[in-house]
Amino acid sequence: RMPDGTMQVLAFAEENAANCIRKGIIDNIDKTTQAISRVLGQIGLQLGQTISRLYVGLSGQSLHTVQNRIQRSFSEKTQISNSLIDQLMDTNRGVVYTASEILEVIPQEYKVGNRIYPDIVGVQVEQMEAHFLNVIARNSLAENIEKCVKGAGFEIAELLITPLALGESILSAGEKRSGCALVDLGADTTTISVYSNNMLRKLVVVPLGANNVTMDIANCLNTEMDEAEALKLKYGRAWLENYDTAQNNILQLSHGRESSESHLCEIIEARYEEILQNVWAQIENESDKLTSGIV
C-alpha cells in the first residue's frame, strides 16, 4: 500500500484451473491444492521472499442473496438500543438455509408502521420490523477453499466475498446512492450486484460466461478449444450489426478448412445475447431504481 492509500501490484501469476474448478466451485481438492502451490511458488520467486498468509476471494455459482425480515413487539414503547440491534442480527444469523451457510449479513432498513428508517437506534417503538440481506452459498464453497489453502501450506488472512469487494473498488458513492447494477462478465459465470440507497440490494450469479462462447465456437466450427479461444480473441465481436467488413473476411482453420468472420461473430453474438437476457431478467424489476444504469 502506497502512502496515498493506493495499491501497487508487486507480482502477478495465474494458473489454469479448468480441470479442477468449475463455475467458481472446487471439483478436485488435490488438483486445486497443487495449483495454489504452483501459483504461490511463482509469486515467491518474483518477490524473492516466502508468502505465508493469503487474502482469498470467494465467488461461484452458489453465491446469492436472500432477504430476511424479523419482527419484534414490545409491551410498551421501547427505545431501540445498539444492543437490541445486535440481538436482531444474532437472530438473523441463526436462520438455517438447507445445505448453505450465511457468509455476510447486510442490514437494510427498519420498518415502524408505514415509516422506513435507515437507522432506528434511539427511536421509540411498540412494534418494528428489521430487514436483512443475507449473502449465502453452499456449505462446501468456503470449506473446500480453506482445505486447499491449508493443504498447500498457507494460512488464510481473510476470506473476501469477491462481488462485494469489486463493488467497493469500482462503484462511486453516487452510483451506489442513486442506484446501479454492477455486472461482472467472467469466464465461467456472470455476477450481477444491484445497489441503491448506498447498499447492496441483490446479488446473483448466472452460470454462463466467456468459456461458453469458446465452447460454442469449438462446437460450431468443429475446432479444438485452444483454436476456438484464439479465433475469439483475434476476430471476435459481441455485436455484428453494421460490421460490414466481416462479411467477406475468410478465416483459415486447422486441417485446411475455412470459415467466415461473420459466421464466427454470429456465434459469439448469439451466446452474449443469451447471457445479457439472463442479466436483464435479474434486474428488470429493479430497473426503475437504477438511475446510474449498468456498470
Image (cartoon, rainbow, N blue to C red):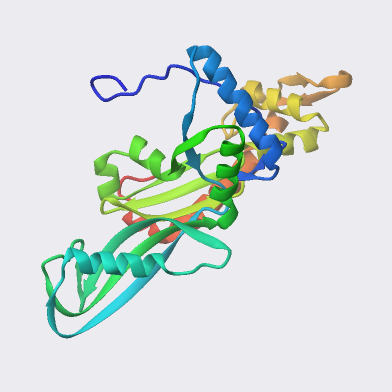
Residue 126 in view: yes
Q: Of residues 257 and 123, which is closer to you in this image?
A: 123
Q: Would you say 33 lies left or right of 154 here?
A: right
Q: Residue at x 57, y 32 (%)?
A: 153
- Which residue is more in the foreground, 180 or 89? 89
The spot of residue 138 in percent (x, y) is 57, 57
Horizontal side, residue 94 vs residue 125: left or right: right
Residue 234, image x, y percentages: 64, 20
How many labels sit on residues? Answer: 0
Q: Is residue 280 above or below residue 148?
A: below
| Residue lying at 29% horizontally and 19% vertically, measured from the top left | 2
Q: Is residue 247 visible?
A: no
Q: Could you tell me which quadrant the C terminus lies in? A: top left
In front here: 261 or 34? 34
User: Where's the N terminus, which quadrant?
Assistant: top left
At 58% across and 46% down in the image, what residue appears?
Answer: 275
